[in-house]
Structure formats: C-alpha cells, structure tokens
Image (tube, helix red, strand yellow):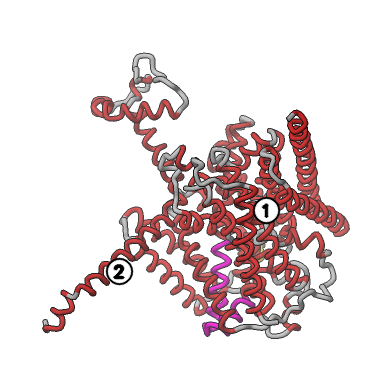
Amino acid sequence: MTNGDHHDRDNPHDENRRDTLRAWLDQARSVAEELYFARYRSTIARARRDQDDLFMLLVFSEMMGVPNPATYYTLELQPLLLERFHEWHTRMGMDHSPLDHFRCC
Amino acid sequence: MSAIVILLLGLAGMALGYFIYSKFIAERIFQLDPNFRTPAHEFEDGIDYVPTNRFILWGHHFTSVAGAAPIVGPAIAVIWGWLPAFLWVIFGTIFFAGVHDAGAIWASVRNRARSIGAVTGDVIGPRARSLFMIVIFLVLLMVNAVFAVVISNLLIANPSAVVPAWGAIIVALIIGQLIYRRRANLLTVSIIGVAALYGLILIGPQVPIVLPETFLGLPQNALWIVILFTYAAIASLLPVWVLLQPRDYINGLQLFIGLGIVYAAILIGNPTVVAPAINPEVPAGTPSMLPLLFVTIACGAISGFHGLVSSGTTSKQINNEQDVRFVGYFGAIGEGSLALAAILATTAGFATLAEWQAVYHAFGEGSVNAFVQGGAAIVANGVGLPESIAVTLLTVMAVLFAGTTMDTGIRLQRYIMQEWGTIYNVPTLKSIPIATLVAVGSCVALAFGAGGLDGSGGLLIWPLFGTTNQLLAGLTLLVITVIIVRMARPMWFTLLPLAFLLTMTTLALLIQLVNFYNNGQWFLLFLDVVILVAAIMVLLECVGVLRKHLRENAATRTAE
C-alpha cells in the first residue's frame, strides 16, 4: 500500500462520494423494487391471504365438524390464530363468530 | 419535411397541453383538493389501497396503458397521410385522452376508488353498468384476436425475432424465480435481465426460425396463432409472480429503452418524412378518412381501455388528489409520444415516396411491420445499429407489448366468464380451466372467423376494435360529465369530446356496416351490428341521464 492510497482512503471527499453513491444505489434499488412489486402487490397479497385462510380453516376444522387427523398438533396453534379468525369473520361480513360454541368477540 | 420539426411540434403541443390545459381542468373543472382524504389513505390496507409516490404510480399507469395498440393504430392510419394522424394524436391527447384518463382516476377517487363500471352503476344506473360489462368483454375479445394476428404476422415477416421474443419469456421466468426464491437484489437482476434480452436480440439474426409452410393442413399464420393462444392460455393460468410480473417489469424497462432509442435516432439522424402530408391518391378500397381515422387511432388519441386501468388499480394508490393530474394526464402524454414515434417511423423510415406507397398499397397493409421496417431504418441510420439487429429490436418490442396484453387480456376474460358463471348460475363456467378454454376459444374463433384460415384478414377487425374502445371511452366520459353536472360545474370540456366521439363512432360503424354487407363479410357484419346496438344504447343513456340532471339543476336554481 502506498502513501497515496492511504491518503485517498482517509480523504473526507472520497468518503462523501462513496456515501453519495451508496445512497444513490439504495434509492435506485428501492425505486426498482417499487416498480416491480407495486403493480402486483394486491394480487399476490390476496393469493397469500387465501392460502392463510385455508390453513386457518384446517386448524379450526374440527369445530366445524370436519374431522382432522392432525387435531392433536393443530390444537396448540388455535390461540395463535385467534386474531386471524376475528379478522376473517369480519372480512366475510359477519360481525361475530359464526360458530355457536366458539365465541370470538 | 424534417422529422425533427414534426417531433418537436408534437412534443411542444403536448407540453402546452400539460402545463396550460390540464392545469385549467384540474383547478377549475375537477377542482382537485390537496386536503381531500384519498381512498389510499382512508382504506389503507397494504394490499389494494397503498398511498404511492406519484412518479412510481405514473410509471405503472403508463406501462399498463401503453401497449402495441398506440403503434398499430397510427401505423395503419398514416395511409391517409401523416398530417391527419399527427393532428388527431396531438389534439386527441391534449383535449380527449388527458381529460378522460385523469377524469377516470378522479371520478374513481371521489367514489371510494371503485372501478369505473361500478361507478357507472351508481351514477347512471344498472342498465348502463350491464352495457359497460358487454363493451369491456367485446374490447378484450377483439384485442386478443387482433394481437395474435399482429404477432403472427411480425414473426413471419421477421424470423430473426422468433428466438429473442420467446427467449424473453424464459428470461422472465428466471427473473421471477431469482426474485422470489433467491431474494436476489432487484437492481442486479434488472441489469442481468436487460442484458440477457439484448443479448438474445443480438444473436437473433443469426438463428432465424421459420415454421414449415403448412403443418397438419394449417398454414404458417394459423400455426403461429394457435401456438400463441396455447401459450396465452397456459400463461394466464400460472400465478402472476411466475411469469406475468417479471415479464411486465422487463417490458416496462424495454419500453423506456426502446422509446429512448427511437427518439434519439430521430434527433441524431433527422430523417425526412417521405409520406405526403395528406395522401392525394389513397389505394382503392380505403375507407373515407373522416370517421375512420378517429376509430383507427384509438390508443394514442383516446382509449377507453385506460379508464379501466385508471379506476381499477391506479385510483386506489393515489397519495394526494392533486397527483391525479400528473399520473392521469401525463400518462396520456406518454402514450401520445409513443403514437408520435409510430407515426414518424412509418412515414420517415422509407427512402422514397414510391417505397412508402409500395408498403401502403392497401388499407390495413403496412401496419406494425411498417413501424418495424421504418423504425429500423431510422435507428440504423441515426444510432448506427446494423439494420438486421434494429429490425429484431423493434419487432421484439412490438411482440412483447402485444404478448403481455394478450396474457392479461385472457386472464381478465376468464374472470368475466367466471363472474357470469356465478351470476347466471352455470357451475361449469366457474371452473378455471373451462372458463379459460371458453375465453381462448372465442378469441380463436374471432381471429379465424374474421379473416379466413390464413388469418390474413385479421386486421380487418382493427377499426371495429377501435369503435368498441371509443364506446368505452364514451361511457367513461359520460360518467365524468354526469358527476360534473351534479356539481354544477361547466360540462363542455367533457361533453364536447363525448359528443364528437359518439358521432364519429356511430358514423364509422354505419360506413363499415355497408362495406361488410357489400363484401359479404357476414361474421364482421354481425359484430358490427352488436357494437352498433351498444353504441345506440350508450347514446340514449347519455341523452336520458343528462336531460334528467340538467332539469334537476334548473329546478334547484328556480327554487333558490
């Protein structure tokens, strides 16, 4: 390493320039990401929500009278999915839980 | 005439439109309010309703509305000379398209960001809403059929584009996987994707692919059309992130690069426009310019399709109501500048008038291939690319546009089919494969039914597509006008374009009706009658609803 290199690295101008470049690249990346994702955000989020709904219904399936061989394992997931359950029934246009023996709110 | 002069005049006209006319419309007619709480904020959910930066939103809006249509329309319409097409594109963009697109976003933003079809139901009535659905279905049907024919013609005329055009699909598939499975940096992926696409364009001319003359009794055109629809059907069934999303993204990048190259080439090479300003000797069989120009160029001057994009997705993401002007009006200007590039490529890209006349020897000839040939000559001359590569570049640009529109179009048609299945209780129609099959089947039937087995006459339906598109624009303008009348603001700025559009559309339909009858084209005649009935119903709705509201306004004024 020469003295000159050492000098360059410490040069506040260069630091600044590197920071500016990094900031610019970050900004370019976030613009590109927005351009890539924004248009399909809703389609993909909706597809994901459908999958999550299906999973939630599997977890709660015994309550609706659908036998589920994995109940033993899914039982402990139920408390975790309570929030989702509430969100789901309100989204489906039902103010309260549709299940008589399972009150939600 | 120098192409630069026309280019600068056009751009200056549109700039004036943006800075003066759109300001007037935004401040006086729509009265955009910076303090209005937009649906993106009111219903913000991170899914549909997301306040979005206006430049990003403009990028999406523009790439969603820009497609092959603003290229095909002007490329056919220059047969009457460059001046009529130029004037209609510029004045259409300023007084029609900009107001229509921004108006559709505004109307939707003021109605909880619902689609313009739903707003129609509220503002005008359920009958107008059904009419809207039918017209949308017809537009999609025709756009898919026409674009399949356009792509097939392009791939046959320029075999060098076959490898890059289909290779772009593989590039998109890989990008999609890299982003979602590997979470790769998007900037790096974009650079790799664009480099791969342009690499394919460079090797395209070395590996031209020509399909056999006939295969299983099908001629080349028909074969491509069948392959394209098979592809579109499969593509429409894939999850959007696998193909459609990366494909759209690459297309968007390619749109900006391609448009940049064409504009730079015109500015550097300054080609001469060889086509006449007004063609004194149009080929025999060319319909009269007066109504037909206004339906031949739909996208690029005014297009109802934009209203669907404006109200479906854009309006849910408007951050501040004042952004409506930039996103909507400037989006229309982006489209106008694409149409302007198409006009210049098809009129200044030929060495002599005789050469131009040889290409435009009949109505519907020339078309996109004239854009590709003429544009390639300009690019080769201006930027110094070898002509074979320039031809491949522009063909790929046009094919990618048309292809993505087909992907989306078939998907939307499937949704409509499934919705009809639900409304009319036809369970089979609700299934995804069957709905797709019916959607694709109807498009194939139209593509072959309009022009015979060789698909050569497929472009005959272009003006019919234009009329349907204009009808849709008319319906949207009607909705905007009614909202404005209800607010007791001046209605002329939307009513006059509406009246002009409906008059031209109806006239064009009548003239085409006579032509189809004389030529014995019964299938097209049937379509024409269907659209004519829709047009008359739109007209009656207009008169009825406006009379009602004007009378109400007058009554309130006397009461006061």
On screen, B195 above or below B59?
Answer: below
Secondary element type, mark 2: helix
Q: Is residue B368 left or right of residue B360?
A: left
Amino acid at the residue labelled 2: Leu
Residue B438 inside the magenta-drawn segment: no
Residue located at (65% from left, 67% from top): B13
Q: Where is residue B296 in the image (x, y as percent from the top left)?
A: 73, 61
Asked if residue B214 can be seen in this view, the reply is: no
Residue B483 placement: quadrant: top right
Residue located at (45% from left, 41% from top): B41
- The subunit letter for the residue under badge 1 reads B
Nearest-to-viewer mark from 2 and 1: 2
On screen, B480 above or below B197?
Answer: above
Q: Give the range drawn in magenta.
A: B373-402
Figure quadrant of the C terminus of chain A: top left
For disc 1, the neighbor class at 10 Å (few under 14, some 14 to 19, many from 20) is many
Residue B386 inside the magenta-drawn segment: yes
Residue designated by label 2: A21
Residue located at (63% from left, 74% from top): B7
Which of the pair B288/A16 is nearer the observer? A16
- The subunit letter for the residue under badge 2 reads A
Residue A52 placement: quadrant: top left
Circle number at residue B142: 1
**Given the current orientation, which residue lies at the most extreme top position?**
A101
Which of the pair B472/B97 is nearer the observer? B97
Q: Where is residue B145 in the image (x, y as percent from the top left)?
A: 66, 56
Q: Position of residue B348 (x, y in %)?
A: 67, 79
